Image (cartoon, grey):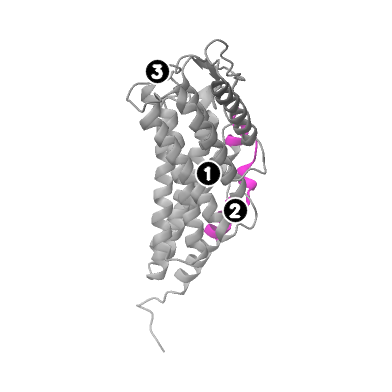
Amino acid sequence: MTHWFHRNPLKATAPVSFNYYGVASGPAASKICSDLRSSRARLLELFTDLSCNPEMMKNAADSYFSLLQGFINSLDESTQESKLRYIQNFKWTDTLQGQVPSAQQDAVFELISMGFNVALWYTKYASRLAGKENVTEDEAKEVHRSLKIAAGIFKHLKESHIPKLITPAEKGRDLEARLVDAYIIQCQAEAQEVTIARAIELKHAPGLIAALAYETANFYQKADHTLSSLEPAYSAKWRKYLLLKMCFYTAYAYCYHGQTLLASDKCGEAIRSLQEAEKLYAKAEALCKEYGETKGPGPTVKPSGHLFFRKLGNLVKNTLEKCQRENGFIPNPNQRKW
């Protein structure tokens, strides 16, 4: 099954020379600074290289972060921080607040910001792979794996590195808890979308698919709630996506719940469940239009025209018609038999 995911833009950064004349004077020190400069440039280059795959990204990220650790941790493996931690100023923009950069003279800020971009790359890679018309089983597994890796990176940054910043994250900026939590939950929700698609392809029980869809809708609702106190000018488009996905998967849940009821000869209840799915699908369709018209970070697309959206509309319509036909065939127990 093909998917469509909203994506915010990558963070941008100012060049860093890592030239420390008078500080890094020996050949070995100069070599490390040169390697830092080239490995950083290589990693930034891969973020926008469409031929980049997870193995290439992991190798490039490991190469840069292993060198950057010398600016964060003491070389004698003590608990003390490196004396080089505050020697370099780093500038990074935000995914939501565009070209307005944040700057900190702190190598931990660089590690977090670059790590954030690595996580974003994995979500974008998953989105490109999932957007194909015929996603294979192996590709679906790769999408699921990439989203889990991204969620893990966001979670690790939040728990292990962001608390170490000397200057706390500014409100509404990427490194603030609300933003990081929203990214984590969105990754979880989208990974579960892949699970639902697989369950449908394998013709699993409608009750299981309904439960998964309802849980996915709750993920999207939780992510939207996390962003509810942010400035609408920055978060409105992202929130439209989360809301339309919430309605979409709640409609999925009602649709498959209706199939479960129909299989139990509960036609009246099945019809009511499908009618609710129809209402929610219509609401999601309206939110799709609003999403396309809302200004803000993210792509300018019409999700209602996407295959993943149209398929649900046809499924709800056909299942409701089937329920109504079945309901019309139920004999009246008071009718006399001749």
The crowding category of the residue bearing disc 2, from other C-alpha atoms within 10 Å (few below 14, some 14 to 19, many at least 20), is: some
Amino acid type, callout 3: Pro
Answer with mark 3 or mark 1, whichever residue precedes in sequence. Answer: 3
Q: Residue 2's mark?
A: 2
> From the image, which quarter does the N terminus lie in?
bottom right
Q: What is the spatial separation of the Cα atoms under label 3 and label 1, in whole angstroms?
A: 37 Å
Residue in the picture at 67% in, 44% down = 51
Q: Which residue is mark 1?
A: 284
Q: What is the spatial separation of the Cα atoms under label 3 and label 2, in whole angstroms?
A: 40 Å
Residue 168 within the magenta-colored segment of the rendering:
no
Q: Nearer the viewer, residue 158 or 173?
A: 158
Answer with mark 3 or mark 2, whichever residue precedes in sequence. Answer: 2
Q: Secondary structure at mark 2?
A: loop
Amino acid type, callout 1: Ala
Residue in the picture at 47% in, 66% down = 323
- Magenta stretch in the rendered image: 290-317
Badge nearest the viewer, 2 or 1 = 2
Q: Position of residue 49 (x, y in %)?
A: 67, 38
Q: Are marks 2 and 1 in contact (CB under 8 Å)?
A: no
Q: Which residue is mark 3?
A: 168
Q: Nearer the viewer, residue 133 or 108?
A: 108
> From the image, which quarter does the C terminus lie in?
bottom left
Q: Secondary structure at mark 1?
A: helix
Q: Against 36, is 262 above or below?
A: below
Residue 298 within the magenta-colored segment of the rendering:
yes
Q: What is the spatial separation of the Cα atoms under label 2 and label 1, in whole angstroms?
A: 18 Å
Residue 176 appears in the picture as rendered: yes
Q: Secondary structure at mark 3?
A: loop
